[in-house]
Image (tube, grey):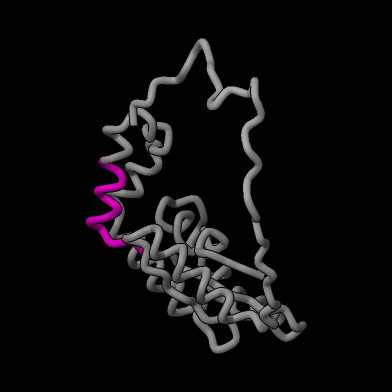
């Protein structure tokens, strides 16, 4: 079972944005470690990742979304309000981690300021958590390419093309 912090919205988004009551939030934090312990005791491997981004990088990403017409769909009024409440989220997530980071179901922090590195680091870590036997790989031999027969064009031609702007 693979979890990231989105499975814990009751402890983060719902708490900060007022979408749950204080009692619902407290119940979630009290019951989550018990639920996770039960899941793990049944033989399920539970791996939890917290993808962490710095304030500066998050701000750069938000500004890029606002400026770039191709990314504007990615930002909503909710995102703007969440951005304003950075420290509220920090406090909520600190409490969530403190209450739900257990020996049987620890949180693993993935630093995501550099997305490519975050993906590679998380993938490598995930693979290190799951026992598996590496299988031998047989590399194919391509041989020589056949020659182009007469009458077949060197390249495809089209009457319309999408401009290469990038």
Q: Residue furthest left?
A: 56
Question: In front here: 164 or 12?
Answer: 164
Q: What residue sits 49% from the left and 13% below the top?
A: 160
Task: Pinpoint residue 137: horizontal percent, then vertical percent.
Answer: 67, 72
In the foreground, 140 or 134: 140
* Residue 144 among those drawn in magenta: no
> Is 61 in the magenta?
yes
Per the rendered image, the range of residues in magenta is 52-63
- Name the residue rendered at 40%, 36% in the picture: 76
| Quadrant of res 114 | bottom left
The answer to which of 22 and 112 lies nearer the viewer is 112
Query: Image quadrant of residue 88?
Result: bottom left
Q: Is residue 100 above or below residue 152?
A: below
Q: Is residue 68 left or right of residue 144?
A: left
Residue sitting farthest toward the right: 42
Quarter of the image with the C terminus in it? top left
- The image position of residue 147, as x and y in percent, is 63, 38
Q: Position of residue 129 (x, y in %)?
A: 59, 81
Q: Is residue 36 above or below residue 60?
A: below
Residue ID at (48%, 55%): 14
In the orientation shown, which residue stands out farthest toward the top?
159
Prevailing SS of the magenta stretch: helix
């Amino acid at each position: 079972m693979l979890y990231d912090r989105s499975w814990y919205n009751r402890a983060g988004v719902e708490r900060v944005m007022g979408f749950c009551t204080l009692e619902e939030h407290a119940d979630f934090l009290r019951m989550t470690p018990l639920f996770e312990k039960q899941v793990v005791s049944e033989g399920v491997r539970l791996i939890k990742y917290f993808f962490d981004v710095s304030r500066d990088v998050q701000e750069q990403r938000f500004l890029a979304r606002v400026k770039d017409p191709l990314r504007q769909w990615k930002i909503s009024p909710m995102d703007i309000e969440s951005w304003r409440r950075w420290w509220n989220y920090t406090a909520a997530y600190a409490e969530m981690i403190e209450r739900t980071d257990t020996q049987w179901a620890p949180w693993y922090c993935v630093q995501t300021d550099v997305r490519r590195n975050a993906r590679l680091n998380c993938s490598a870590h995930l693979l290190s958590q799951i026992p598996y036997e590496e299988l031998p790989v047989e590399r194919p031999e391509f041989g020589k390419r056949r020659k182009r027969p007469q009458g077949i064009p060197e390249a495809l031609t089209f009457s319309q093309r999408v401009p290469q702007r990038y």
